[in-house]
Amino acid sequence: MRVIKHYRIHTGTFAWILHRLSGLGLIFYLLVHIWVISHLSGGEGSFDGIMNFFANPFARLLEVGLVGVILYHLFNGLRITLVDMGVMVEKQKTLYAAAVVVWLASWIAVGAVMISRMGSPLHG
Amino acid sequence: MKFRETTTSGGALPWLLQRISGVYLAVILLIHVINLHVLIGGELTYAAIAERVATPLWKTINISFLIVALFHGLYGLWIVLDDYIHKGWMRILIYGGIAAIALMFGIYGTLTMITFQYGG
Amino acid sequence: MAKFKFRINRFDPDRKDRGHYMQEYELEVPKGYTVLDCLNDIKWKIDGTLTYRRSCRSGICGSCAMTINGVNNLACESQVYALGGDTINVEPLRGYPVIKDLVISLDPLVKGLLAVKPFMITRTPPPSDQERLQSPEDRDKLEGLYECILCGSCTSSCPSFWADKEYIGPHAFLKAYRFVADSRDESPREHLAALDDKHGVWRCHTIFNCVEACPKSLNPTKAISELKKEIVRQKLG
Protein backbone atom coordinates (compact mmCIF):
# COMPACT_ATOMS: atom_id res chain seq x y z
CA MET A 1 0.00 0.00 0.00
CA ARG A 2 1.34 3.41 -0.94
CA VAL A 3 2.82 5.60 1.78
CA ILE A 4 0.84 8.81 2.26
CA LYS A 5 2.94 11.91 2.02
CA HIS A 6 0.48 14.66 2.57
CA TYR A 7 0.38 17.22 5.34
CA ARG A 8 -2.86 19.12 5.74
CA ILE A 9 -2.80 22.55 4.12
CA HIS A 10 -3.77 25.02 6.82
CA THR A 11 -4.73 28.67 6.18
CA GLY A 12 -1.17 29.86 6.78
CA THR A 13 0.36 27.27 4.45
CA PHE A 14 -2.05 28.29 1.71
CA ALA A 15 -1.25 32.00 2.22
CA TRP A 16 2.47 31.25 2.13
CA ILE A 17 2.36 29.13 -1.04
CA LEU A 18 0.35 31.83 -2.85
CA HIS A 19 2.78 34.50 -1.59
CA ARG A 20 5.74 32.61 -3.03
CA LEU A 21 4.07 31.86 -6.36
CA SER A 22 2.83 35.45 -6.78
CA GLY A 23 6.30 36.73 -5.86
CA LEU A 24 7.98 34.53 -8.44
CA GLY A 25 5.53 35.74 -11.09
CA LEU A 26 6.12 39.37 -10.16
CA ILE A 27 9.92 39.09 -10.52
CA PHE A 28 9.40 37.87 -14.06
CA TYR A 29 7.00 40.76 -14.73
CA LEU A 30 9.41 43.29 -13.20
CA LEU A 31 12.22 42.24 -15.53
CA VAL A 32 9.92 42.34 -18.58
CA HIS A 33 8.62 45.73 -17.42
CA ILE A 34 12.16 47.15 -17.17
CA TRP A 35 12.83 45.93 -20.70
CA VAL A 36 9.56 47.43 -22.03
CA ILE A 37 10.20 50.81 -20.41
CA SER A 38 13.75 50.84 -21.75
CA HIS A 39 12.17 51.44 -25.16
CA LEU A 40 11.78 55.08 -24.03
CA SER A 41 15.43 55.50 -24.97
CA GLY A 42 14.58 54.69 -28.58
CA GLY A 43 12.21 57.62 -28.86
CA GLU A 44 8.53 57.89 -29.73
CA GLY A 45 8.42 55.27 -32.48
CA SER A 46 10.21 52.63 -30.45
CA PHE A 47 8.13 53.17 -27.30
CA ASP A 48 4.74 53.37 -29.00
CA GLY A 49 5.70 50.31 -31.03
CA ILE A 50 6.23 48.11 -27.99
CA MET A 51 3.17 49.57 -26.25
CA ASN A 52 1.06 48.78 -29.31
CA PHE A 53 2.33 45.23 -29.18
CA PHE A 54 0.67 44.88 -25.76
CA ALA A 55 -2.47 46.78 -26.76
CA ASN A 56 -4.59 43.73 -27.54
CA PRO A 57 -7.47 42.25 -25.53
CA PHE A 58 -5.41 39.21 -24.49
CA ALA A 59 -2.59 41.32 -23.04
CA ARG A 60 -5.16 43.61 -21.36
CA LEU A 61 -6.80 40.63 -19.69
CA LEU A 62 -3.38 39.41 -18.56
CA GLU A 63 -2.92 42.87 -17.09
CA VAL A 64 -6.10 42.49 -15.04
CA GLY A 65 -4.65 39.20 -13.76
CA LEU A 66 -1.35 40.91 -13.02
CA VAL A 67 -3.11 43.52 -10.90
CA GLY A 68 -4.69 40.68 -8.92
CA VAL A 69 -1.31 39.03 -8.36
CA ILE A 70 0.28 42.33 -7.30
CA LEU A 71 -2.56 43.14 -4.91
CA TYR A 72 -2.43 39.66 -3.34
CA HIS A 73 1.31 39.93 -2.77
CA LEU A 74 0.84 43.45 -1.43
CA PHE A 75 -1.90 42.76 1.09
CA ASN A 76 -0.55 39.37 2.19
CA GLY A 77 2.87 41.01 2.50
CA LEU A 78 1.40 43.67 4.78
CA ARG A 79 -0.19 40.86 6.80
CA ILE A 80 3.18 39.13 7.17
CA THR A 81 4.76 42.41 8.23
CA LEU A 82 2.06 42.95 10.84
CA VAL A 83 2.50 39.40 12.18
CA ASP A 84 6.27 39.93 12.36
CA MET A 85 5.61 43.10 14.35
CA GLY A 86 3.57 41.00 16.75
CA VAL A 87 0.20 42.39 15.64
CA MET A 88 -2.66 39.88 15.69
CA VAL A 89 -0.38 36.84 15.91
CA GLU A 90 -3.05 35.14 17.96
CA LYS A 91 -5.75 36.11 15.47
CA GLN A 92 -3.79 35.22 12.36
CA LYS A 93 -6.73 33.58 10.58
CA THR A 94 -8.92 36.65 11.08
CA LEU A 95 -6.05 38.80 9.83
CA TYR A 96 -5.68 36.61 6.75
CA ALA A 97 -9.42 36.73 6.11
CA ALA A 98 -9.26 40.53 6.31
CA ALA A 99 -6.32 40.60 3.90
CA VAL A 100 -8.23 38.38 1.45
CA VAL A 101 -11.35 40.58 1.66
CA VAL A 102 -9.33 43.75 1.01
CA TRP A 103 -7.45 42.00 -1.79
CA LEU A 104 -10.59 40.80 -3.58
CA ALA A 105 -12.44 44.09 -3.08
CA SER A 106 -9.57 46.16 -4.46
CA TRP A 107 -8.99 43.74 -7.33
CA ILE A 108 -12.65 43.79 -8.32
CA ALA A 109 -12.74 47.59 -8.14
CA VAL A 110 -9.56 48.12 -10.16
CA GLY A 111 -10.37 45.25 -12.51
CA ALA A 112 -13.82 46.65 -13.25
CA VAL A 113 -12.32 50.01 -14.22
CA MET A 114 -9.73 48.31 -16.41
CA ILE A 115 -12.28 46.14 -18.18
CA SER A 116 -14.70 49.05 -18.71
CA ARG A 117 -11.87 51.09 -20.28
CA MET A 118 -10.92 48.20 -22.53
CA GLY A 119 -13.87 48.84 -24.82
CA SER A 120 -13.15 52.54 -25.21
CA PRO A 121 -11.48 53.65 -28.48
CA LEU A 122 -8.46 54.94 -26.58
CA HIS A 123 -7.47 51.37 -25.85
CA GLY A 124 -6.97 49.51 -29.09
CA MET B 1 25.77 16.14 22.07
CA LYS B 2 27.73 19.36 21.67
CA PHE B 3 26.37 22.85 21.68
CA ARG B 4 26.06 24.27 18.23
CA GLU B 5 28.62 26.89 17.55
CA THR B 6 27.08 30.30 17.79
CA THR B 7 27.49 32.10 14.53
CA THR B 8 26.98 35.70 13.61
CA SER B 9 26.23 35.12 9.95
CA GLY B 10 23.22 37.29 10.60
CA GLY B 11 20.23 37.80 8.38
CA ALA B 12 18.57 40.42 10.56
CA LEU B 13 19.37 43.38 8.31
CA PRO B 14 18.17 41.86 5.00
CA TRP B 15 15.08 40.56 6.81
CA LEU B 16 14.30 44.07 8.06
CA LEU B 17 15.07 45.64 4.67
CA GLN B 18 12.74 43.15 2.98
CA ARG B 19 9.86 44.37 5.17
CA ILE B 20 10.69 48.06 4.87
CA SER B 21 11.13 47.78 1.11
CA GLY B 22 7.83 45.92 0.88
CA VAL B 23 5.97 48.73 2.62
CA TYR B 24 7.80 51.31 0.51
CA LEU B 25 6.80 49.45 -2.65
CA ALA B 26 3.16 49.35 -1.54
CA VAL B 27 3.16 53.15 -1.18
CA ILE B 28 5.12 53.95 -4.31
CA LEU B 29 3.05 51.49 -6.34
CA LEU B 30 -0.07 53.38 -5.34
CA ILE B 31 1.53 56.65 -6.48
CA HIS B 32 2.72 54.99 -9.69
CA VAL B 33 -0.71 53.63 -10.52
CA ILE B 34 -2.59 56.82 -9.61
CA ASN B 35 -0.19 58.88 -11.67
CA LEU B 36 -0.30 56.68 -14.76
CA HIS B 37 -3.85 55.45 -14.79
CA VAL B 38 -5.80 58.23 -13.06
CA LEU B 39 -3.90 61.52 -13.51
CA ILE B 40 -2.58 60.78 -17.01
CA GLY B 41 -5.30 58.29 -17.84
CA GLY B 42 -6.14 57.17 -21.32
CA GLU B 43 -3.63 55.33 -23.42
CA LEU B 44 -0.03 55.43 -22.22
CA THR B 45 1.61 56.71 -25.39
CA TYR B 46 5.02 58.33 -25.58
CA ALA B 47 3.37 61.72 -26.03
CA ALA B 48 1.28 61.22 -22.90
CA ILE B 49 4.05 60.24 -20.48
CA ALA B 50 7.37 61.54 -21.85
CA GLU B 51 7.16 65.04 -20.39
CA ARG B 52 6.55 63.75 -16.89
CA VAL B 53 9.18 60.99 -17.06
CA ALA B 54 11.78 63.62 -18.05
CA THR B 55 11.37 65.68 -14.85
CA PRO B 56 14.03 65.19 -12.12
CA LEU B 57 11.35 64.41 -9.51
CA TRP B 58 9.84 61.56 -11.50
CA LYS B 59 13.26 60.32 -12.50
CA THR B 60 14.17 60.06 -8.82
CA ILE B 61 10.91 58.35 -7.90
CA ASN B 62 11.18 55.91 -10.80
CA ILE B 63 14.80 55.03 -10.09
CA SER B 64 14.08 54.43 -6.38
CA PHE B 65 11.09 52.30 -7.41
CA LEU B 66 13.32 50.34 -9.76
CA ILE B 67 16.13 49.71 -7.26
CA VAL B 68 13.84 48.87 -4.34
CA ALA B 69 11.67 46.56 -6.46
CA LEU B 70 14.73 44.76 -7.81
CA PHE B 71 16.11 44.31 -4.29
CA HIS B 72 12.79 43.12 -2.86
CA GLY B 73 12.08 40.77 -5.76
CA LEU B 74 15.51 39.25 -6.16
CA TYR B 75 16.21 38.95 -2.43
CA GLY B 76 12.79 37.31 -2.16
CA LEU B 77 13.76 34.92 -4.95
CA TRP B 78 16.95 34.11 -3.06
CA ILE B 79 14.96 33.39 0.13
CA VAL B 80 12.79 30.92 -1.80
CA LEU B 81 15.72 29.18 -3.50
CA ASP B 82 17.72 29.20 -0.25
CA ASP B 83 15.09 26.89 1.21
CA TYR B 84 15.42 24.23 -1.45
CA ILE B 85 18.94 24.34 -2.84
CA HIS B 86 21.56 22.87 -0.56
CA LYS B 87 24.43 21.85 -2.85
CA GLY B 88 27.29 24.33 -2.35
CA TRP B 89 28.17 24.86 -6.01
CA MET B 90 24.51 25.25 -7.01
CA ARG B 91 24.03 27.89 -4.33
CA ILE B 92 27.06 29.85 -5.54
CA LEU B 93 25.87 29.58 -9.13
CA ILE B 94 22.36 30.77 -8.31
CA TYR B 95 23.52 33.48 -5.93
CA GLY B 96 25.87 34.73 -8.66
CA GLY B 97 23.10 34.55 -11.23
CA ILE B 98 20.73 36.58 -9.09
CA ALA B 99 23.43 39.17 -8.36
CA ALA B 100 24.18 39.41 -12.09
CA ILE B 101 20.50 39.93 -12.94
CA ALA B 102 20.22 42.59 -10.22
CA LEU B 103 23.26 44.44 -11.52
CA MET B 104 22.31 44.12 -15.17
CA PHE B 105 18.71 45.23 -14.84
CA GLY B 106 19.56 47.80 -12.17
CA ILE B 107 22.09 49.52 -14.40
CA TYR B 108 20.00 49.08 -17.55
CA GLY B 109 16.88 50.56 -15.96
CA THR B 110 18.72 53.38 -14.23
CA LEU B 111 20.43 54.36 -17.48
CA THR B 112 17.06 54.35 -19.26
CA MET B 113 15.75 56.80 -16.69
CA ILE B 114 18.85 59.03 -16.35
CA THR B 115 19.55 59.43 -20.04
CA PHE B 116 15.94 60.06 -20.98
CA GLN B 117 15.35 63.50 -22.37
CA TYR B 118 12.25 65.13 -23.74
CA GLY B 119 12.81 68.02 -26.07
CA GLY B 120 9.19 69.17 -25.96
CA MET C 1 -18.89 0.72 19.14
CA ALA C 2 -18.08 1.23 15.50
CA LYS C 3 -15.52 -0.20 13.14
CA PHE C 4 -12.54 1.97 12.19
CA LYS C 5 -9.81 1.31 9.65
CA PHE C 6 -6.31 2.26 10.76
CA ARG C 7 -3.72 2.74 8.03
CA ILE C 8 -0.36 2.76 9.75
CA ASN C 9 3.03 3.58 8.27
CA ARG C 10 5.36 0.63 8.85
CA PHE C 11 9.13 0.51 8.57
CA ASP C 12 11.37 -2.29 9.79
CA PRO C 13 15.08 -1.43 10.01
CA ASP C 14 15.90 -5.13 9.69
CA ARG C 15 13.88 -5.38 6.47
CA LYS C 16 15.04 -2.20 4.75
CA ASP C 17 14.30 -3.84 1.37
CA ARG C 18 10.59 -3.48 2.14
CA GLY C 19 11.01 0.23 2.77
CA HIS C 20 8.09 2.23 4.13
CA TYR C 21 4.62 0.85 3.52
CA MET C 22 1.14 1.32 4.91
CA GLN C 23 -0.52 -1.54 6.78
CA GLU C 24 -4.26 -1.69 7.44
CA TYR C 25 -5.91 -2.82 10.66
CA GLU C 26 -9.65 -3.00 11.30
CA LEU C 27 -10.77 -2.37 14.82
CA GLU C 28 -13.94 -2.14 16.91
CA VAL C 29 -13.48 1.13 18.77
CA PRO C 30 -15.49 1.99 21.90
CA LYS C 31 -16.57 5.61 22.32
CA GLY C 32 -13.98 7.69 24.16
CA TYR C 33 -10.97 5.79 22.79
CA THR C 34 -7.97 7.84 21.73
CA VAL C 35 -5.68 6.92 18.85
CA LEU C 36 -3.17 5.73 21.44
CA ASP C 37 -5.77 3.37 22.96
CA CYS C 38 -6.32 1.94 19.49
CA LEU C 39 -2.60 1.52 18.84
CA ASN C 40 -2.40 -0.34 22.16
CA ASP C 41 -5.32 -2.57 21.12
CA ILE C 42 -3.61 -3.33 17.81
CA LYS C 43 -0.27 -4.07 19.45
CA TRP C 44 -1.69 -6.15 22.27
CA LYS C 45 -4.40 -8.06 20.38
CA ILE C 46 -3.60 -8.05 16.65
CA ASP C 47 0.04 -7.37 15.77
CA GLY C 48 2.75 -7.33 18.43
CA THR C 49 5.35 -6.07 15.97
CA LEU C 50 3.79 -2.59 15.73
CA THR C 51 6.22 -0.14 17.34
CA TYR C 52 5.54 3.33 18.73
CA ARG C 53 6.55 5.47 21.70
CA ARG C 54 4.18 6.06 24.55
CA SER C 55 4.41 6.70 28.21
CA CYS C 56 2.02 8.84 30.23
CA ARG C 57 -1.10 8.51 28.00
CA SER C 58 -2.32 11.86 29.35
CA GLY C 59 -0.71 14.57 27.28
CA ILE C 60 2.20 15.36 29.56
CA CYS C 61 5.23 13.38 28.41
CA GLY C 62 5.12 14.20 24.69
CA SER C 63 6.22 10.70 23.64
CA CYS C 64 3.35 9.76 21.35
CA ALA C 65 3.42 12.69 18.92
CA MET C 66 2.69 11.45 15.39
CA THR C 67 1.00 12.53 12.18
CA ILE C 68 -2.68 11.61 12.41
CA ASN C 69 -4.78 12.20 9.29
CA GLY C 70 -2.14 14.59 7.98
CA VAL C 71 -1.78 16.71 11.13
CA ASN C 72 0.69 16.34 13.97
CA ASN C 73 -0.82 15.64 17.35
CA LEU C 74 -0.38 13.50 20.43
CA ALA C 75 -2.00 10.09 19.88
CA CYS C 76 -3.20 10.15 23.49
CA GLU C 77 -5.05 13.43 22.92
CA SER C 78 -6.69 12.47 19.62
CA GLN C 79 -10.23 11.22 20.19
CA VAL C 80 -10.97 8.70 17.44
CA TYR C 81 -14.64 9.68 17.10
CA ALA C 82 -13.75 13.37 16.85
CA LEU C 83 -11.42 12.83 13.88
CA GLY C 84 -14.28 12.42 11.42
CA GLY C 85 -14.34 9.58 8.90
CA ASP C 86 -13.82 5.91 9.54
CA THR C 87 -10.30 5.63 8.13
CA ILE C 88 -7.44 6.97 10.21
CA ASN C 89 -3.98 7.44 8.75
CA VAL C 90 -1.13 7.26 11.22
CA GLU C 91 2.41 8.21 10.20
CA PRO C 92 5.62 8.99 12.08
CA LEU C 93 6.44 12.71 12.56
CA ARG C 94 7.86 13.86 9.26
CA GLY C 95 11.25 15.47 8.87
CA TYR C 96 12.91 13.24 11.45
CA PRO C 97 14.78 10.01 10.67
CA VAL C 98 12.48 7.02 11.25
CA ILE C 99 13.93 4.32 13.50
CA LYS C 100 11.04 1.87 13.33
CA ASP C 101 7.35 2.17 12.39
CA LEU C 102 6.17 5.27 14.28
CA VAL C 103 9.36 5.77 16.30
CA ILE C 104 11.52 8.66 15.09
CA SER C 105 14.97 9.85 16.09
CA LEU C 106 14.72 12.99 18.18
CA ASP C 107 18.35 13.97 17.54
CA PRO C 108 17.48 16.95 15.29
CA LEU C 109 15.01 18.18 17.92
CA VAL C 110 17.64 18.02 20.67
CA LYS C 111 20.27 19.59 18.43
CA GLY C 112 18.03 22.58 17.76
CA LEU C 113 17.18 22.86 21.43
CA LEU C 114 20.82 22.88 22.54
CA ALA C 115 21.58 25.66 20.05
CA VAL C 116 19.58 28.14 22.12
CA LYS C 117 21.13 27.14 25.47
CA PRO C 118 17.85 26.02 27.02
CA PHE C 119 18.64 26.82 30.62
CA MET C 120 18.76 29.91 32.82
CA ILE C 121 22.04 31.74 32.53
CA THR C 122 23.08 33.76 35.58
CA ARG C 123 26.17 35.78 36.45
CA THR C 124 25.39 36.87 39.98
CA PRO C 125 25.39 34.33 42.81
CA PRO C 126 21.95 33.37 44.14
CA PRO C 127 20.78 34.76 47.47
CA SER C 128 22.21 32.60 50.24
CA ASP C 129 18.92 32.10 52.08
CA GLN C 130 16.36 31.71 49.27
CA GLU C 131 15.73 31.05 45.59
CA ARG C 132 15.97 33.71 42.90
CA LEU C 133 12.73 35.58 43.26
CA GLN C 134 10.45 36.93 40.57
CA SER C 135 7.48 39.27 40.82
CA PRO C 136 4.06 37.83 39.91
CA GLU C 137 3.99 40.24 36.93
CA ASP C 138 7.29 38.92 35.61
CA ARG C 139 6.11 35.37 36.19
CA ASP C 140 3.02 36.09 34.08
CA LYS C 141 5.28 36.90 31.11
CA LEU C 142 6.22 33.21 30.96
CA GLU C 143 2.64 32.03 30.44
CA GLY C 144 2.33 30.20 27.15
CA LEU C 145 6.09 29.70 26.98
CA TYR C 146 7.08 27.28 29.74
CA GLU C 147 4.36 24.66 29.09
CA CYS C 148 6.11 23.07 26.10
CA ILE C 149 6.51 19.31 26.50
CA LEU C 150 9.00 18.96 23.62
CA CYS C 151 6.91 16.47 21.67
CA GLY C 152 8.29 17.72 18.34
CA SER C 153 4.89 18.25 16.69
CA CYS C 154 5.56 21.89 15.79
CA THR C 155 8.98 21.53 14.22
CA SER C 156 7.90 18.41 12.33
CA SER C 157 4.96 20.35 10.82
CA CYS C 158 7.12 23.25 9.65
CA PRO C 159 7.84 23.55 5.89
CA SER C 160 11.00 25.49 6.73
CA PHE C 161 12.22 22.44 8.68
CA TRP C 162 11.25 20.10 5.85
CA ALA C 163 13.39 22.26 3.57
CA ASP C 164 16.33 22.75 5.93
CA LYS C 165 17.31 19.92 8.26
CA GLU C 166 19.63 22.28 10.16
CA TYR C 167 16.73 24.63 10.94
CA ILE C 168 16.72 25.21 14.68
CA GLY C 169 12.95 24.87 14.78
CA PRO C 170 9.94 26.47 16.51
CA HIS C 171 10.23 24.26 19.61
CA ALA C 172 13.69 25.70 20.28
CA PHE C 173 12.59 29.26 19.47
CA LEU C 174 9.76 28.98 21.98
CA LYS C 175 12.25 27.68 24.56
CA ALA C 176 14.70 30.48 23.72
CA TYR C 177 12.05 33.12 24.25
CA ARG C 178 11.00 31.44 27.49
CA PHE C 179 14.45 32.37 28.86
CA VAL C 180 14.81 35.69 27.04
CA ALA C 181 11.52 36.76 28.63
CA ASP C 182 12.51 35.51 32.09
CA SER C 183 13.43 38.37 34.44
CA ARG C 184 15.90 36.14 36.26
CA ASP C 185 17.95 35.27 33.18
CA GLU C 186 21.01 37.51 33.05
CA SER C 187 22.27 36.79 29.54
CA PRO C 188 19.51 36.85 26.93
CA ARG C 189 22.12 37.48 24.25
CA GLU C 190 23.47 33.97 24.69
CA HIS C 191 20.07 32.49 23.89
CA LEU C 192 19.74 34.79 20.87
CA ALA C 193 23.24 34.23 19.47
CA ALA C 194 22.40 31.13 17.46
CA LEU C 195 19.08 32.53 16.24
CA ASP C 196 20.48 35.35 14.10
CA ASP C 197 21.60 32.80 11.56
CA LYS C 198 20.53 31.33 8.25
CA HIS C 199 19.23 28.31 10.15
CA GLY C 200 17.67 30.61 12.74
CA VAL C 201 14.55 32.74 13.05
CA TRP C 202 14.88 34.38 9.62
CA ARG C 203 13.93 31.11 7.97
CA CYS C 204 10.53 31.29 9.67
CA HIS C 205 8.07 32.40 6.98
CA THR C 206 5.14 32.81 9.41
CA ILE C 207 3.31 29.80 7.99
CA PHE C 208 1.68 29.05 11.37
CA ASN C 209 1.83 25.25 10.94
CA CYS C 210 3.54 25.08 14.35
CA VAL C 211 0.61 26.84 15.99
CA GLU C 212 -1.86 24.51 14.28
CA ALA C 213 0.10 21.45 15.36
CA CYS C 214 0.88 22.27 19.00
CA PRO C 215 -1.12 19.88 21.23
CA LYS C 216 -0.67 22.30 24.14
CA SER C 217 -2.15 25.21 22.13
CA LEU C 218 1.03 27.24 22.47
CA ASN C 219 2.05 29.89 19.95
CA PRO C 220 5.65 29.47 18.73
CA THR C 221 5.04 31.99 15.93
CA LYS C 222 4.32 34.68 18.51
CA ALA C 223 7.55 33.84 20.33
CA ILE C 224 9.42 33.96 17.01
CA SER C 225 8.04 37.42 16.18
CA GLU C 226 9.18 38.63 19.62
CA LEU C 227 12.63 37.11 19.02
CA LYS C 228 12.89 38.74 15.59
CA LYS C 229 12.03 42.12 17.09
CA GLU C 230 14.49 41.60 19.94
CA ILE C 231 17.36 40.69 17.60
CA VAL C 232 16.65 43.66 15.32
CA ARG C 233 16.49 45.96 18.36
CA GLN C 234 19.90 44.73 19.51
CA LYS C 235 21.39 45.11 16.02
CA LEU C 236 20.18 48.68 15.74
CA GLY C 237 21.80 49.40 19.09
Image (tube, helix red, strand yellow):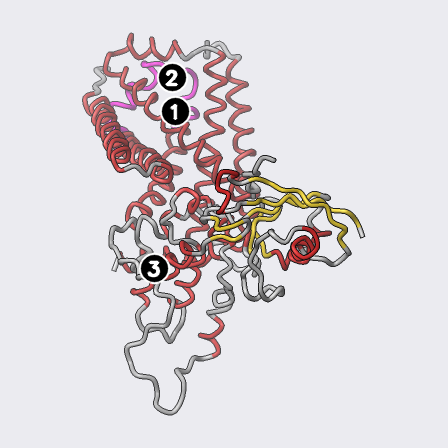
Q: Residue furthest bottom?
A: C129
Give the quadrant of residue C86.
Answer: top right
Q: Which mark is residue C115?
A: 3
Residue for badge 2: B44
Q: Secondary structure at mark 2?
A: loop
Q: Residue furthest front?
A: C14
Q: Nearer the viewer, mark 2 or mark 3?
A: 3
Q: Which residue is located at x 44 percent, y 74 percent?
A: C138
Residue A16 showing in the rendered view: yes
Amino acid type at image mark 2: Leu
C14 within the magenta span: no
| Picture residue at 37% right of the left edge, 13% below the top | A51
Q: Position of residue B74 (x, y in %)?
A: 31, 33
- Residue at the spot of label 1: B36
Q: Position of residue C223 (x, y in %)?
A: 44, 59
Across and down, in percent, residue C17 comes to 49, 38
**Nearer to us in this view, B83 or B59:** B83
Residue B40 included in the magenta stretch of the image: yes
Quote the CA–CA distance across marks 3 and 1: 51 Å
**Subunit bearing disc 3:** C
The region drawn magenta spans B35-60
Q: Amino acid at mark 3?
A: Ala
Q: Is residue C165 above or below residue A40?
A: below
Does the CB distance between marks 2 and 3 fall below 8 Å?
no
Q: Residue at x 32, y 14 (%)?
A: B46
Q: Nearer the viewer, residue B115 or C118?
A: C118
CA gap, disc 1 and disc 2: 8 Å
**Amino acid type indicated by mark 1:** Leu
